[in-house]
Image (tube, grey):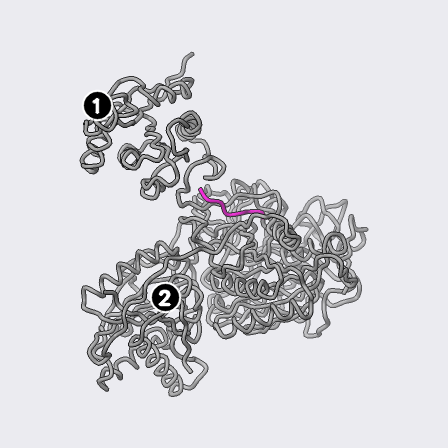
Amino acid sequence: MEQKKWRVVCYINQFFGQIGGEDMAHVGFSVKEEPVGPALLFQKLLQDDCEVVGTIICGDNYFAEHTEQATAEGVELVRALKPDLFIAGPAFNAGRYGISCGNMVSAVGRELGIPTVTGMYPENPAVELFRKDTYIVKTAILSSQLRKAAPVMASIGLRLLKGEHIGSAASEGYIIRDIILNEEQPQNAAERAIDMVLKKIKGEPFVSELLPPKFDHVPPAPPVADLSKVKLALVTDGGLIPQTNPDKLKPNGSTTWGHYNWDTLVAEPHFVIHSGYDGTWVLENPYRLFPVDILREEVAQGKLGALEEEVYVSCGNCASVAASKAKGQQIAQALLDKGIQAAILTST
Amino acid sequence: MKLTVETLKIKDLQFGDTTCLKDGVLYVSKADILAFAESEPCFNTLKIDIARPGDSTRIINVVDVVQPRCKVSGNIDWPGVLTDDYEIAGSGVTRAVEGMGIVLCQNNTYWSRKWGSFDMSGECAAINPYAKMPELVIEPMAPEDADFRDYREAVRRVGFKTSVLLAKVTLGQAPDSTETFDNETQYPDLPSIAYSYQIYSKQYDTQNYREPMVYGNAVPDSLPLIMQPTEILDGAIAPCGGFRCVTTYEIQNHPVIVELMRRHGKDLNFAGVLITVTSVEAKHRYLVSKMAASLLKEVFHADGVIVTKGVGGASTLCVGAIASEAEKLGIKAVPIIQILNGKSNLGVECMISEQNVDSIVCSGTYYHNFTLPPVETLLGGPEDALYLSGDDGVIGGHKIATGRPAKGEVRSTYMKQVGLMSQVGYSYGMAVDY
Amino acid sequence: MGIPVTQICAVVDIAKSVGSSRILRGFAITCPVGNPTLSAEDETTSRQRYVEKALDMLTKPGQSGMVEDIL
C-alpha cells in the first residue's frame, strides 16, 4: 500500500528558476506546479516520502525592493499549494537571495506553522537575521556546491516532517539557532577536566568547551559639564519592585523592566524579585540599592540639579548579554525622552 | 592522609521489621529511622518511603541525597555535625553501601529558594544516577511555625544518622571491593595537579542563614583553606540547605578527588586540595584568587589545577579569577562551569571574562528544559504541592508560589533535576549549540 | 549624544567586560551602596561617599573598563 506523500514547496530566485540573470532580477513572482532547478534535486532526494508540488520563483530585486509586500505575496502563493514542508534556496553567499529566502522561510514557518529549511554561506548577511527562525544549513560560497548542501537540507526537512530529533548545529551542519542544550558525554565533567589540564600541561592540543566572550566596545558618553544643572536618574538591575509586579519581571532571565515613583515604591508593599542574591539587606534599607536619601540632600544643597522621581528597575539575574543590551537600550531611550542627562546604575 | 573505603553492594532495599542485611537485601525498619526524629523537637514525624527505578514517582523538595557510610576504624562519624567532639576526618577505614541512596526532602517548600526534584522513570531518569537505584525518601513533617534553621540542621542530622545506621548493619558482611585513597607519597616527576574546590556561596543563604558546611561550621567569608582530599570524602564537608546542584552523595564520591587519587602516581601527581568560598565582595575575591594562586604555586608546586564552583554567577566569576591568577603564575587551570541561559549561544555565554582562561569544561546549561508527564506517586511534599519553576520559593523573604500541580505534567530544568547537573563534575552533560 | 552613567557594582568584571566606562566598586553584591555592618549613622556617611564619588565620576571623561574605588 502506497502511503500518502508529504507535499513540498520550494522557493528559488529568477536565476535558479531559469528565467534569467541580473537583467531579469526585477521580475515578480511566478509559480510552477512542478520542481524547477534545485527543486529537481530535492524531489530526487525526497522522492520516497515527499513530492515537490510547486516551485515559487521571484526576481532578486523585486523581492529586495519591496520585502514586506513580497513576503506577504509569496506566503499566499505558498499557502495555496498546501505544503507540509517549505524549502528555500539555498542562497549560498548571495545577499539579496539570502534576504528573500530568509524572509520566506521565516514568514511561512510563522504563518503556516510548517517546518522550513534553507541554506546559506555562514557570512551571508541574512544569516544573522533569520538563523533563529529556521534551519539554515551551512553552504559553500558558490552554487556549484549545491550537491553538498541539498542532502543535508533534505535530511533535516524530512526529519522535521517525521517529528524526529534534529541534533546539534555542529553535528548536523546548520547555523546556530541560539538554543543551548545539554548532551551527555562518555566522560563526566571531572574526568574531562583532568584530561584537559594534562593535555594543556604537556602542550598537546585540546578543545575548550567554552571560551571567554569578546564583547562590544562601547564609547563612553561625554562627561557632565555642571552637575548643578543636570537631572539625574537612578537605575538598577537589582530587582526591587512593587509586590504587584506590574511589569512582570522574572526572578531570572527577565526581559522586562519597570519604572516606579520612589516614594510610592517604598511606601507600598515591595520586594526583591532577583533570585541571584539575598535581598535581606536591601529590604532592610532600600537606600542601599537606590541612594535616594543622599541624592536628595545633594539636590537640596544645590550640588545636583534634580533627581528624577522615578527609579528604573530591571532584574539582572541570569540575563544574557543580548537581552541586557535590549533592556539597556529601552531604558536609555526612556531616560532621553524624559530629558535625563546623567545616571547612576547600581548592580547586584 | 590515607583513607580506605570498603564498598558493599546491595541487591535491593526493602522495609522490614528490623534494620538488617539479609541475602544482599538491605531491610530498613521505619521505627529505627523514626527514633532519630524523636530527639528533634522541630519535627512532628517523618514520612518514609522507598522509590524504585522505573516507578512512576516524582520526588520533590529534595535538598540532599546521601550514601550510607560509617567509620569502621573507631573514628567519629560526621565530626561536628553528629557530635560536638571533633577529629579530623579522612583516615582509617570507612564502609560504604552501594546500590541505594537516602533522599532528604524539605516539606515546606517556601523555606528553600533552591530545591530540586527528580523522577524515577522517564526522560530524565534515563540519565540520572539517582533514578537508577532504590532511594529511601525521608520527608520530615514540621509544624507551620518551625524555625527553618533548626529544621534544616535537623533534616541533615536525621539523614546522616540514617546513613551511619544503614552502613553499620552491613558490617557483618565482607565488602565487595576495597579502595585506598592515598596521596602521601608525592611524585615530583609527574605533572602535578591540584584541586581548588569552592564549597559554598553565602549569596544564596536565605535570610542570612549561614550554611554550616565545614565540620558543621559556617565559613561565610573564609580565605582559602588547605584540606586533605580524604577529609572531603569522609565527612568534613556537608551541605545543609537548599539544593544547589551538588549532593552529599557527590561529595562522598567526589569525582575530581576520586579520579585524581586513582591516577596519582600513574600519569599525574595529586598535589592537594584548596577549599574556597564564593566572594560576594570584590575585595575579598581579589584576595582569595591571588592567595589561592599563590598557595597552588608555593605550597602545592602545582603544574595544573582543576577549579570547581558553587551554583550561580558570582561563583563563576570567583573560579574565573582563581583560574586567571593561577595561569598568570604559570599554572594551567581548567575550571568546570555552567551556562546560565538556554536561549543564547556558547559564543557569548561564558561568564568568565579573563582571556587567559582558555581551557574550560562546561557541564551544561541550567536551562535545558524538560516537560515531564504526570506521575502516580508524589513524594517529598503534599499531594497538592505545586511544582515551582525556576528559582521560585522564597525570594528576598517574599513567598512566590506559582507553578503547576507537581503530580501532573510539569516543566522542569536540567539544574532542578537532582543528579543531572553536578557542580563538582559528577554529571556527564555538556552544553552544545543548537 | 549619550547619557553618562556611573555603574556601582561589587562584581566589576562583568561591568568591565561589557564595556562600562565609569565603574565604581560597590560594597557587596547584596548591598551596592552602604555597609550593613556599620551603625545607621556611619552607613549613611559611607553611602554619601559612594554617591559623591559616583557624581564626581560623571563629571570626568569615562574610559572603558576603568574601575574606581571610594578611598
Q: Quadrant of the N terminus of chain B?
A: bottom right
Q: Whole-Å distance between the Cαs marked 2 and 1? A: 52 Å
Image check: B211 left or right of C40?
right
The answer for which chain carries disc 2 is: C
Please state which of residues A168 and A28 is positioned toward the viewer in this rendering.
A28
Return the x and y of residue B73 as percentages of the image width and height.
Answer: 80, 63
Q: Secondary structure at mark 1?
A: strand
Q: Residue at label 1?
A: A30
Q: Amino acid at mark 2?
A: Ser
Residue B431 highlighted magenta (yes or no): yes
Residue B219 x/y as whole percent? 58, 72
As rendered, which of B43 and A148 lies closer to the eye? A148
> What residue span does the magenta drawing correspond to?
B428-434
**Residue C20 - label:** 2
Residue at x 44% of width, y 73% of height: C28
Left or right: B96 as drawn, with respect to B45:
right
Q: Amino acid at mark 1?
A: Ser
Residue C58, picture quadrant: bottom left
Return the x and y of residue B85 as percentages of the image width and height: 71, 74
Q: Is residue B162 left or right of residue B399?
A: right
Mark 2 surroundings: few (<14), some (14-19) or many (≥20) residues within 10 A: many
For numbered disc 2, what is the local secondary structure?
Answer: loop
Tell me the crowding category of disc 1: few under 14, some 14 to 19, or many 20 or more residues within 10 angstroms, Cα based.
some
Q: Where does the image place residue A153, in percent across and percent down from the top left?
A: 41, 29
Task: Locate the C terminus of chain B by quadrant.
Answer: top left
At x 31%, y 76%, the residue is: C60
Q: Is any part of residue A5 visible from this angle?
A: yes
**How many numbered marks, from 0 up?**
2
